[in-house]
Image: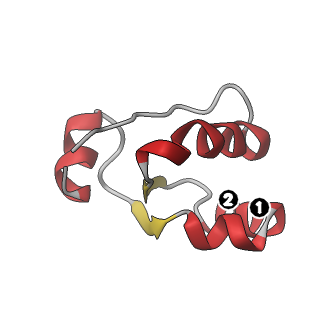
Amino acid sequence: MPALSALIASGMDTDRFLYAGSSQLSRALGERSWKALAAKAAGLTLVLYEAPHRILETLADVEAVWGEQARVVVAVN
């Protein structure tokens, strides 16, 4: 699903969002990169692309950085 279609369908705030592309680069850089992304995305809806085989690991990274109260929507193409 294209990023903007997923964003609109998510029901999350569409006024201010950050498209960060794939998390693959972030994973290579480690937790520091996730924290830097979190700082950049403060107050914004964050849009990421992720491969199906990495989604659970990425969701665990999101929880580790944003906490278990983070609102997440997974859209499948």
**Disc number for residue 71:** none
Q: What amino acid is at disc 1?
A: Lys
Q: Position of residue 11 (x, y in %)?
A: 28, 33
Mark 1 touches mark 2? (CB < 8 Å): yes
Farthest residue to the top: give it. 69
Q: Quadrant of residue 25?
A: bottom right
Q: Amino acid at mark 2?
A: Ala
Q: At x 74% / y 34%, what residue is drawn? A: 67
- Tell me if residue 51 comes above or below residue 52 in the rendering: below
For residue 29, side relative to residue 7 (left or right): right
Q: Nearer the viewer, residue 14 or 48?
A: 48
Indicate the secondary structure of the residue bearing disc 2.
helix
Work out whether 19 lies above or below 77: below
Q: Which residue is mark 2?
A: 38
Measuring 68% from the left and 64% from the top, which residue is drawn there?
27
Q: Which residue is mark 1?
A: 35
Residue 21, image x, y percentages: 43, 69
Which residue is at the front of the view, 11 or 76?
Answer: 76
Q: Along the line of sight, which residue is nearer the eye, 30 or 6?
A: 30
User: Is 5 positioned to the left or the right of 58 in the image?
Assistant: left
Q: Residue at x 66, y 26 (%)?
A: 69
Quadrant location, the C terminus = top left
**Which residue is more in the foreground, 30 or 38?**
30
Q: Is residue 61 left or right of residue 77?
A: right
How many numbered callouts? 2
Q: Residues within 10 Å of mark 1 (few under 14, many from 20)?
A: some
